[in-house]
Amino acid sequence: MKESGDGGVHARNMISVIVPLTTDEDGQIELLASALPSDSHDVEVVFVFSGPTAPSVQTTQSNVTTCWVEQRGRGVALDTGVQNARGDVLLFLHSDTTLPVEGLQMISAALDDPRTTGGWFRRRLDDPRWRYRLVDLGANTFSRICHIATGDQAIFCRRSAYLAVGGFAAYPLFEDMTLCRRLKGLGRFSQIASSVLVSPRRFYERGILRTVSMNLLLTLRYFCGHDPSDLFQRYYGTPSS
């Protein structure tokens, strides 16, 4: 164990898997925790809930921690998760994203290089049809060229790098790309060749063309400096707070 830059104590060689949830998802933690790959690496799972009321959660798993923040917004939630995590490696995992079987080993192997600050995985939507492979190709190519990933690509980094760049911005949307843009300025920030499996639920709800068009438009506006709170409302149709 050693002191961390945020004033706490964290465990060397431990991976903290931080999973953001809303308070109405508090019944999922046992299922989600059991679905994470288990291997020889020390790992803890931190579920961080956000919403106006504290969740009533119970878990019997010793390596699972839960915490809650009243303020909505994934950036705030994930940063709260970091404050409650003990590992010196941070993995930010959405609840509808599944790591490959040896995903934690791949992260440890990537960070064996001291020049590496972090990285992300390729993405594969969980639908075998060719149109979803085209969507994956576009997303993975963008990430590889720009060295910027989205939250469903299982972004990971060293705790020291996270603290050095100031952590997640308190954004309701694009907190993931903002963190990547900061991290890649510190050192090597690269894509792992294996893919995480991601639920295509939003593509089913809105349709592929509408979803891809909306994502591209909002991303362009984000890079042009538009307020992420306004972009959140355009994407979800509701205010961010």
Image (spheres, helix red, strand yellow):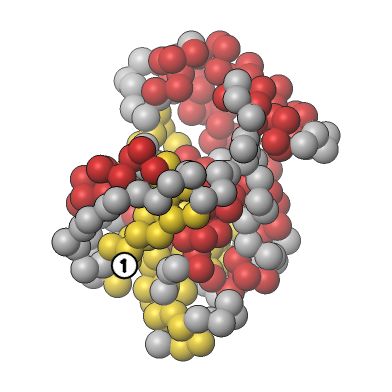
Q: Quadrant of residue 238?
A: top right
Location of mark 1 (residue): 43
**Image location (x, y in percent) of residue 170:** 66, 51
Say whether residue 111 is left or right of residue 185.
Answer: left
Q: Position of residue 160 (x, y in %)?
A: 58, 74
Number of dots carrying numbers: 1
Q: Which type of secondary structure does the marked residue at label 1 adopt?
A: strand
Quarter of the picture containing the N terminus is bottom left
Residue 21 at x, y = what percent? 41, 45
Q: Is residue 198 above or below residue 238?
A: below
Q: Position of residue 184 (x, y in %)?
A: 67, 58
Which residue, as the protein is rendered here, is positioned at the far bottom?
2
The reply to whether residue 127 is in sight is yes
- Give the residue drawn at x 37%, y 55%: 47
Q: Is residue 137 above or below residue 20?
A: above
Q: Is residue 8 above or below residue 108?
A: below
Q: Tell me the quarter of the picture where residue 6 sits.
A: bottom right
The answer to whether residue 174 is left or right of residue 19 is right
| Residue found at x 45% / y 37% | 123
Q: Amino acid at mark 1?
A: Val
Instruction: Farthest residue to the left: give it.
Output: 60
Asked if 193 appears above or below 183 in the picture, the reply is above
Assess disc 1: are there few (<14), some (14-19) or many (≥20) residues with their C-alpha within 10 Å of its C-alpha.
many
Which residue is found at the position 68% from the left and 65% from the top? Answer: 166
Q: Quadrant of the C terminus?
A: top right
Q: Is residue 131 left or right of residue 114?
A: left
Of all residues, the one furthest to the front in this rendering is: 53
Return the residue nearer the eye: 111 or 222: 222
Give the residue displayed 45% in from the left and 22% down from the top: 202
**Looking at the image, which is closer to me, 221 or 30?**
30
